Each structure stands twice: as structure tokens, then as C-alpha cells.
Amino acid sequence: MDATTADGSAARFDVFAASCPSRRLLDAIGNKWAGLVIVALGLKGPMRYSELSLRIEGVSQKMLTQTLRGLERDGLVTRTVTPSVPVRVDYELTPLGLSLLEIMRHLKDWAETHMSEVDAARTAYDRASA
Amino acid sequence: MDATTADGSAARFDVFAASCPSRRLLDAIGNKWAGLVIVALGLKGPMRYSELSLRIEGVSQKMLTQTLRGLERDGLVTRTVTPSVPVRVDYELTPLGLSLLEIMRHLKDWAETHMSEVDAARTAYDRASA
DNA sequence: CAGGATCCTCTATGATACTG
DNA sequence: CAGTATCATAGAGGATCCTG
């Protein structure tokens, strides 16, 4: 993990450098909705805009669109337009998106396994502070 | 991951419900610095506040303190004060924090493996849009 | 050294209205 | 249906000064 190179030739990754790609990873999945969209698309095959909208509780049109655009730009999802009379648009995970889905599943598993501990710690902390 | 049950009997977690704990997981690691702090603490043993501050490029005092407090509250790190003449404070991952570190390593690995693909997709997308 | 307290600035996110 | 455009706002994040 060298932060020494500016060219990036021999350097691997330095999460602590402001310019490291791994920081952009956090941008990609760290935002409020991207992870949720990826997991939603992982549940089944292609999903329509409206399906996603219904499935992901609380997302606004703007945020859903913005998130999908970002994921498309990053090569994580594909956007397929079918020019029928009411237009139909399907979103689907790319292979790259599927690989990220695996990570999201790890996150999900961690949450399922340890979230109660986090809650307990939080309660204890708050009680001690009060 | 059933989103189908309204009764909640058989349902485990529904990431798509606004109240699901998994959303709070995203809060815990999705913010700009928490993940970085965890990875930093995973590099070696306990670290002092100033060490972390130097290691994590770009963090402000406020954000570092705030992040550490949050992680402590969630039971992911411990805070140990040594009342020497200039006070000394060490932060260290708890077992729970270590388990999350594992996930962070998955994320890091994914980034190292696929970030170039993301960059390529991004470049292509931007070129096509121009 | 390790923060606490303030003030200030964006950015992320949302609500609403409109369109091909 | 699947968005785009616009306006509005809370809160994340940062700069700075101060203290035990």
C-alpha cells in the first residue's frame, strides 16, 4: 500500500490517499440508494423502473433516476429501452454488477448476524452517557 | 430476504423497508470516513488519535472525532484514555469491529480487482454522452 | 495531545410540476 | 411509463479558535 507514486505504476492502493480509487468505491456504494438498487436487481432478472420504484421504499423519482444513471455509468447495470407505446425501460445487473452484488451480500450477512450487537452496544452507550 | 410478508412472521430482513436495520448498516459504514477508520485500525493494533489523523488523508478533526464516537457507540471500537501528562488516547477495534473489518477487506478486494473496469465503463459512458 | 464549540458552505436529497 | 426540470432544505462536512 504505497502512497508514494503519482504515476500509479508501481503503487497498489492506498485507501488513505484522497485520490485512491477505493474512495470512489465508497461513493459508488456508500450513497443511500445505490446498494439498495443493486440488491433489488439481484433478486430477480431485469426490473422495470416502476418495479424498482415500488420495491425500494422511500426512494424519490429523482434519486432513483440519478442512482440508476450512476450505476449505468459505472458499468454496473444496463439500461434497455423498448420503444413500445408507453415506453418500457428495463434495468439489469451486468457481470460487473453481479460481482458487486456478492459483496453486498456479505454486507447483508454481516448486518443480519451482528446488527443486534450493534444495537445493544448503542443502547448501552446511550444509557451510560445519559 | 422476503419482502412479501406484511405480518413479518417468516420475514427476516427487508432491506427495502425504510425501517430495516440494514439501512442503518449503510449509515454505519457508508459515510465518508467510518470505513476508512476501520481499515486504518485494522492495519495494526491500537492507534492514537494523532496517528489516525495523519494516516487518513483529508479528515478534519471534527469528522475524525465524530466518526470515532459513532464507531465507539456502535461497539466497533474501544477508546482508552491514559491520563499521562499530555493525555493519550488509543483506539482499537473490538471483536465486532474486526468482523466488520473482514467485510471491508472484501470491499477493498473488489475495488482492487474491478475498479479499472469501472473506470473504463465510466470513460466510455462519458465519451458516448459527449 | 485530544478534542469541544462555532460558524459557514456546499451537497445530497426531497417535493412538486411538467413532458415525450 | 419513465423520466426531466426546478425549487427548496437539512445535514454532512470543513475551517477556525479555544481548552483541560
Image: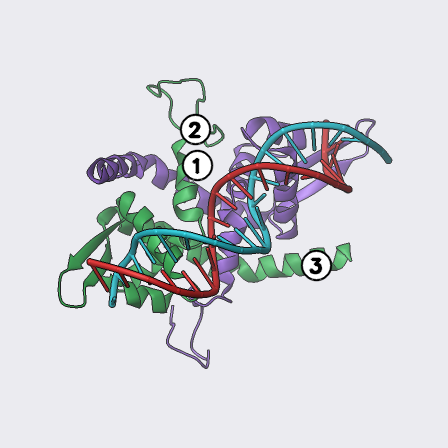
Chain colours: A green, B purple, C red, D cyan
Q: Nearer the viewer, residue A122 or B100?
A: A122
Q: Position of residue C20 (x, y in %)?
A: 20, 58
Kindly identify which chain the residue marked by label 2 belongs to.
Answer: A
Residue under disc 3 on the same chain as residue under disc 2: yes
Label whose residue precedes the other's in the sequence (3 or 2): 2
Res. A27 image quadrant: top left
Residue B80 higher or lower than A19, as above or below: below
Q: Position of residue A5 (x, y in %)?
A: 40, 17
Q: Which residue is mark 2?
A: A19
Asked if marks 1 and 2 touch (Cβ < 8 Å), the reply is yes
Residue A70 higher or lower than D18, as above or below: below
Helix, strand or loop at label 3? It is helix
Res. C3 image quadrant: top right
Kindly identify which chain the residue marked by label 3 belongs to.
Answer: A
Helix, strand or loop at label 1? It is helix
- Residue drawn at x 26%, y 44% is A75
Q: Which residue is mark 3?
A: A124
Q: Label 3 sits on what residue type?
A: Ala
Q: Which residue is mark 1?
A: A23
What is the C-alpha distance between the residues marked 1 and 3? 32 Å
Q: Position of residue B13 (x, y in %)?
A: 45, 68
- Label 2: how many Cα within 10 Å (few below 14, some 14–19, many 20+): some
Q: How many marks?
A: 3
- Residue drawn at x 69%, y 42% is B79
- Residue drawn at x 52%, y 52% is B27
Q: Nearer the viewer, residue A33 or B11?
A: A33
Is D6 on the left-hand or right-hand side of B47? left
- Name the quarter where the N terminus of chain A is drawn: top left
- Residue drawn at x 43%, y 74% is B11
Q: Label 2 sits on what residue type?
A: Ser
- Name the quarter where the C terminus of chain A is drawn: bottom right
Label whose residue precedes the other's in the sequence (1 or 3): 1
